[in-house]
Image (cartoon, coloured by chain):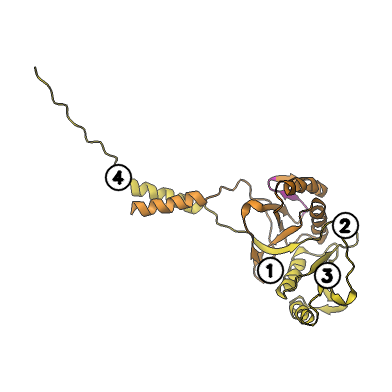
Chain colours: A yellow, B orange
Amino acid sequence: MMLEKRKERVVAIPTSSMADIAFLLLTFFLVTTSLDLDKGLGLALPPKGEAKPIPKQNIASIWINDAGEVMLDDEMTEISRIREIIKQRLAQNDKLTVSIKTGRNTLYQTYISVLDQVQLAEAKRISIAEPEM
Amino acid sequence: MPDIVFMLLLFFMVTTVFRQFSGLPVNLPTAKKIEKLEAKKNVVNIWADAEGEISIDDKILDQVNKLRRVMYEKVNENSLITTSLKIDRAAKMDLVTQIHQELREAGALRINYCAKSGQ
């Protein structure tokens, strides 16, 4: 009887190309990953139907008209100067509420610039007044 | 070497989020004092462009006052929600105020005006 010896096959996964494949996948995921984090100005809106009267001396009112001109307490002001003024007023009165009122056609960018300035001045109490409809 | 590559690969695979919807094309305003938004799962995105078109998450709304219902449901599901407003810099405040009103009605009081850093 002839028992034929079975040839043992060497089974192996070809590993030489593994790195290449991994690199290819890596590049794919690198390109498709978007690690974009949204950034922006935070603000808390007042709850519905709540209108607390604020003593007048605690309010700094900012008006922005349709043309993008800014008035801070009845004085025309450059947007870039709002920060210092609010900071000074906050130093005098820490209960200061900044009220921002806009016109109906005011550009959003102008509003954001003003809000940015107010937040740069570390004002914590900001109120957004509704424009007259 | 392949080990390291695989590790990196795994990292990127895990962090990759395929965006289903990228919103309306908007030109974000610029601001200086910007802060990062926290956990993405607590964020609702609202887009509004200069023409007054509004979109929430992936639906386009034809009327602003429909926002109230959608937001109300979202707040009910998750009270920690922050609304990220992605509004075009050329949009009018009229629209922004309407959105504010809708959010107040829905009780979604925490908002974030999405902005780019810059002047």
For the residue marked with disc 2, what is the amino acid?
Answer: Gly
Residue named by callout 1: B31
Q: Which mark is residue A49?
A: 2
Crowding at dot 2, Cα within 10 Å, few <14 / some 14-19 / many 20+, comes out as few
Residue named by callout 4: A15
SS category of the residue bearing label 1: strand
Indicate the chain on which mark 1 is placed: B
SS category of the residue bearing label 2: loop
Residue B28: horizontal and vertical position, in percent?
Answer: 68, 61
Residue A99: horizontal and vertical position, in percent?
Answer: 83, 70
For the residue marked with disc 3, what is the amino acid?
Answer: Ser
Tell me whether marks 4 and 3 sit on the same chain. yes
Marks 4/1 in contact by CB < 8 Å: the verdict is no
Tell me whether marks 2 and 4 sit on the same chain. yes
Crowding at dot 3, Cα within 10 Å, few <14 / some 14-19 / many 20+, comes out as some
SS category of the residue bearing label 4: loop
For the residue marked with disc 4, what is the amino acid?
Answer: Thr
Which residues are drawn in magenta? B51-58
- What's the distance in space between the residues labelled 4 and 1, CA to CA? 52 Å
- What's the distance in space between the residues labelled 2 and 4, CA to CA? 68 Å
- What's the distance in space between the residues labelled 4 and 3, CA to CA? 67 Å
Of residues B119 and A46, which is closer to you in this image?
Answer: A46
Residue named by callout 3: A99
